[in-house]
């Protein structure tokens, strides 16, 4: 096992600043020269399908890339026994034993300076991607990268392999001009972000901490100030079968499921109400941030029979400050009250199971140095300040901020149709994120010359 050094406080407590103008220009030019290699790396990442349970080939590529950059390698599987008692643990979306599936590893590349004079940094990204949907609806095969009109297409191109490629290119740009970070940098390629976050949690459990973490999620050059919590659960409804000659003698589980979802939608409306005590100030300008989504439904046995069973998988959003226990309790109470009072649910049994995401929301103070320096770096590249956003999704940033004493935010490229058909990322945006991150890393970590 790789030895992870204990986190040392930054010796320089002054506000981190952008590097000198001459170094800025050298870094920007080096980042631009890196773009052909960056696009080649991104294309190879897309060619390696990294769907849930099939991440090994993509992680092999990450390990090879990290080694070629001179980073020390820490590759390890998710050991559920080590994280299942953590408050941020989410029940796996795969049926795995206590050590996970063979080859489903996290890969971390570690840079250690000769002498630390700057702030340490985690650059985190997830290698896993969501399913493609119907492949025949894609303009080109989803795992065969295609460049068209300044965009690279393919599943995972935007979410979030482009961000990983940009972060690596930013580090490489430093090396290209003979410099390296003057602080520890941990580049994390993690699995299972799209369903539990247990990959990032395993990194946290392993001891990784830093003065800040940046995740280059495809949020179009914005600075993330907050994100919602996300919870998955399954409702299993059991009614009574009957012939359609007399449907009143049965209890229709599918019809009952729609009724129960409507009761849960009432809870959604309560949480989104402007005066709700749960509604976080970061989402004040969002008309309806907390979404309750029915993501999957299955049920019934025969067209001419009243269906006995129905399964519904739901994903719900909730605000920073709402605890996991309180959200689960609110869901249970809503279901119990509905079953006790709504005649449409009489005689129908309901089983509630929580699985997948059990993720708290969080917010980060806009005055955090990591946000201020990222904003300065963005302004140096674009000539204007970045937009600040509160996201209605979840990211792995929650682990660092809530449980790791590591302020975390997201800053990444512009992508379109993520989780959809013909996902793509802007190559101009890929270049610009590389530029911003190169300036940020130099300012945050400081630099020292590479000595052969």
Image (spheres, grey):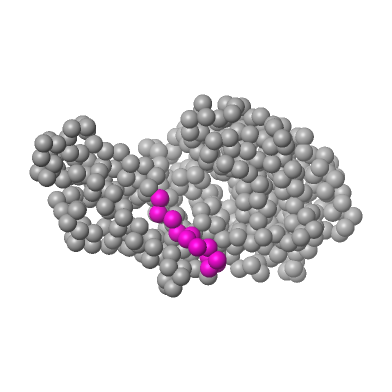
Q: Magenta residues?
A: 282-293
Give percent across and percent down for residue 440.
74, 55
Residue 250 position by quadrant: top left
Q: Is residue 44 visible?
A: no
Give the residue drawn at x 38%, y 60%: 268
Res 410 quadrant in image: bottom right
Let me know if residue 215 is in the magenta part: no
Residue at 61%, 49% (x, y): give it.
217
Q: Magenta segment, principal secondary structure?
A: loop
Q: What is the quadrant of the C terminus in the image?
A: top right
Q: In the displayed structure, does residue 336 sit left or right of residue 26?
A: left
Q: Where does the image place residue 129, in percent across and percent down from the top left?
A: 53, 38
In the foreground, 153 or 363: 153
Residue 287 part of the magenta-drawn span: yes
Residue 231 drawn at (x, y percent): 41, 53
The quadrant of the rendering that contains the N terminus is top right
Of the pair 100 and 95, the residue shown nearer to us: 95
Please tell me which residue is depicted at 61% across the width and 68% down the height of the picture: 365
């Amino acid at each position: 096992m790789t030895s992870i050094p204990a986190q040392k406080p930054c010796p320089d407590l002054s506000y981190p600043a952008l590097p000198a103008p001459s170094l800025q220009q050298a870094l920007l030019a080096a980042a631009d020269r890196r773009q052909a290699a960056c696009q080649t790396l991104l294309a190879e990442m897309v060619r390696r399908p990294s769907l849930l349970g099939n991440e090994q080939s993509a992680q092999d590529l990450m390990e090879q890339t990290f080694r070629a950059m001179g980073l020390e390698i820490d590759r390890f599987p998710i050991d559920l026994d080590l994280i299942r008692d953590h408050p941020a643990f989410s029940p796996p979306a795969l049926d795995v034993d206590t050590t996970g599936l063979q080859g489903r590893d996290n890969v971390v590349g570690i840079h250690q300076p000769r002498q630390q004079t700057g702030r340490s940094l985690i650059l985190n990204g997830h290698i896993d991607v969501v399913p493609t949907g119907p492949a025949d609806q894609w303009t080109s095969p989803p795992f065969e990268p295609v460049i068209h009109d300044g965009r690279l297409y393919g599943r995972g191109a935007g979410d979030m392999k482009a961000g990983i490629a940009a972060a690596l290119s930013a580090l490489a740009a430093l090396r290209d001009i003979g410099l390296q970070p003057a602080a520890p940098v941990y580049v994390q390629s993690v699995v299972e972000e799209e369903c539990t976050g247990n990959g990032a949690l395993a990194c946290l459990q392993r001891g990784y901490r830093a003065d800040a973490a940046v995740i280059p999620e495809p949020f179009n050059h914005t600075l993330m100030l907050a994100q919602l919590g996300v919870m998955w659960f399954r409702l299993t409804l059991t009614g009574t079968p009957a012939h359609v000659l007399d449907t009143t003698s049965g209890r229709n589980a599918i019809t009952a499921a729609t009724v129960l979802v409507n009761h849960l939608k009432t809870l959604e409306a309560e949480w989104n109400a402007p005066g709700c005590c749960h509604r976080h100030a970061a989402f004040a300008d969002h008309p309806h941030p907390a979404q309750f989504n029915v993501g999957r439904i299955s049920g019934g046995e025969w067209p001419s029979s009243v269906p006995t069973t129905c399964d519904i998988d739901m994903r719900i959003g909730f605000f920073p400050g709402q605890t996991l226990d309180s959200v689960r309790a609110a869901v249970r109470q809503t279901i119990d009250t509905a079953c006790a009072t709504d005649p449409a649910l009489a005689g129908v049994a309901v089983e509630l199971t929580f699985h997948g995401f059990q993720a708290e929301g969080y917010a980060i103070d806009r005055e955090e140095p990591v946000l201020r320096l990222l904003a300065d770096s963005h302004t140096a590249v674009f000539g204007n300040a970045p937009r600040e956003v509160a996201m209605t999704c979840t990211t792995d940033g929650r682990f660092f901020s809530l449980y790791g004493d590591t302020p975390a935010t997201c800053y990444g490229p512009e992508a379109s149709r993520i989780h959809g058909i013909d996902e793509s990322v802007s190559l101009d945006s890929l270049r610009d994120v590389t530029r911003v991150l190169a300036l940020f890393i130099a300012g945050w970590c400081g630099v020292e010359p590479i000595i052969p």
